[in-house]
Amino acid sequence: MNAVIETEAVPIHIGADGVWRIGSTRVTFDTVAAAFDEGATAEEITQQYPSLALAEVYAALGWYLKHRPKAETYLRTRDAERQHVRQANEARFEPAGIRSRLLARQAAKA
């Protein structure tokens, strides 16, 4: 008897915004990779993000380990984008004193 082994696609999908997500969820590859790099197991990741299937997390982590240079390039790009957005937001909305400004605004409405 010949055994047939089925192959399955890696459950990492690139959205219209260019962000890699796991399976059909909104959980980003960045999130899963960061949790894994911080020592979380696949089981712990699925506990933290119940929309993820354990098999999807294992498959994504397997791809991550096998294709580390490509994944790291993507993660560095995403980090640079995050920093750019943060700087743009901080330039538009000064973060220093935000609490006092919000409390003053709330007091003015009362």
Image (cartoon, rainbow, N blue to C red):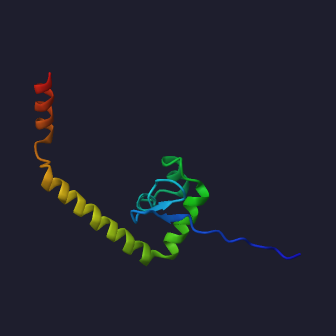
- Position of residue 64 relative to residue 89, above or below, is below
Residue 82: x percent and y percent? 28, 61
Residue 33 visible here: no
Task: Name the image quarter holding residue 107.
Answer: top left
Indicate left or right for 109 with 51 as reference: left
Residue at position x 24%, y 62% in the image: 83
**Image quarter (top left, top right, bottom left or bottom right) of the N terminus:** bottom right
Looking at the picture, does residue 11 appear above or below residue 5? above
- Taking 76 as reference, is 71 left or right? right
Is residue 89 among the parts visible in the rendering? yes
Please state the total of marks drawn on the protein image.
0
Q: Residue furthest front?
A: 16
User: Residue at 38% of width from left, 71% of height from top?
Assistant: 74
Which residue appears at 49% of the width and 70% of the height? 64
Q: Position of residue 29 (x, y in %)?
A: 45, 62
Q: Which residue is drawn at 16% across and 54% down?
A: 90
**The quarter of the displayed image where residue 91 is located:** bottom left
